[in-house]
Amino acid sequence: MNLADNEIHLWLSFERPKDEPALTQLRSILHSKELERVDTARSSETKLRFLAARAMQRTVLSRYAPDIEPATWRFVTGEYGKPALAPQFQPLGLHFNLTHTQGLLALAVSRQRDIGIDAENLYERTTALQLARRYFTAEEARNLEALPPERQPARFYSLWTLKESWMKASGRGISAALDNAAFSLDDQHRVVGMSFAAYDAADWRFWQYRPTEEHVLAVALRAPGATGGVTVATQEWRPDEMIHGP
């Protein structure tokens, strides 16, 4: 599969109970440490989600490097925990970021290093205002609280996913601090302005999606001088296709 410098491929997978047999077969491509994490998860739902996430990551990367079997990939983590390909695979020029939440997994693949993605389920948290007061800028929190209660979850998660994807793209994780990125949103919760404590906003671009009625997703890219012409193509990943062939 081809991936140009100005493209991001966004892979989505929707959790379905019927996928469990195929996911179980995909255990064979995971590394022992990944399997250990799967097997020590607290619930069967979490086990399957982690298994799917790692299988998705490995099989999708092999789409771009067909000579490399999914089980062969090895990964490292940066100083702040961002995953990347191990040194022997870095000449391939593939960069990725993964997120998962109840009902949805998403993987962004890019030729640009500073790529980040976050997805959230609208119905998972009930403390939006408390979190906003703690992690958002004062203006973001005020604007959120000014909305009618029924509109607050969508606004909260739009901001949250934008900030999380930004932190993940920066490679600094939570050390970057959510309130060091400020976003202005329109009535449809789309970005109309942004500023950062330690970055030039012109170097960043964000994409926002609603894959389902209950999910909010954001993709962040930092590519100085190259964000203007970048496009995103979305594809679905299905576990059964990995068993029987795409």
Image (cartoon, rainbow, N blue to C red):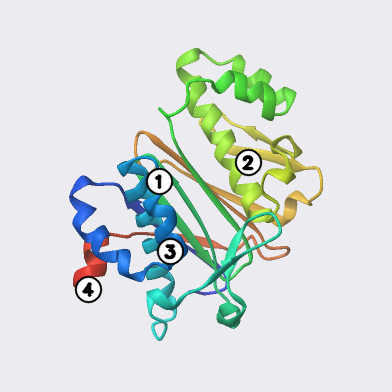
Q: Is residue 2 visible?
A: no
User: In terms of sequence position, does the residue under pointer 2 or pointer 1 come before the other?
Assistant: 1
* In the image, residue 143 above or below residue 68: above
Using the image as rendered, state which of residue 83 and residue 218 is in the foreground.
Answer: 83
**Residue 105 position in % (x across, y down):** 39, 50
Q: Give the Cα distance between marks 1 and 4.
A: 29 Å
Q: Amino acid at mark 4?
A: Gly
Quadrant in the picture for the N terminus: bottom left
* In the image, residue 156 above or below residue 220: above
Q: Give the Cα distance between marks 4 and 3.
A: 16 Å
Residue 41 - label: 1
Mark 1: which secondary structure? loop
Residue at the spot x=55%, y=28% of the render?
156
Residue labelled with disc 4: 245
The reply to whether the C-beta atoms of the residues labelled 1 and 4 are less than 8 Å apart is no
**Residue 203 position in % (x across, y down):** 72, 56
User: In terms of sequence position, does the residue under pointer 4 or pointer 3 come before the other?
Assistant: 3
Q: Viewed as shown, does residue 142 lie left or right of 199?
A: left
Q: Of tags 1 and 3, which is closer to the observer?
A: 1
Q: Is residue 222 visible?
A: yes
Mark 2: which secondary structure? helix
Image quadrant assignment for residue 113:
bottom right
The reply to whether the C-beta atoms of the residues labelled 4 and 2 are less than 8 Å apart is no
Residue 146 - label: none
Residue at the spot x=26%, y=61% of the render?
239
User: In terms of sequence position, does the residue under pointer 3 or pointer 2 come before the other?
Assistant: 3
Q: Give the Cα distance between marks 3 and 2.
A: 23 Å
**Residue 77 position in % (x across, y down):** 62, 62
Q: Give the Cα distance between marks 4 and 2.
A: 36 Å
* In the image, residue 114 above or below residue 246: above
Residue labelled with disc 3: 57
Residue at the spot x=64%, y=48% of the render?
166
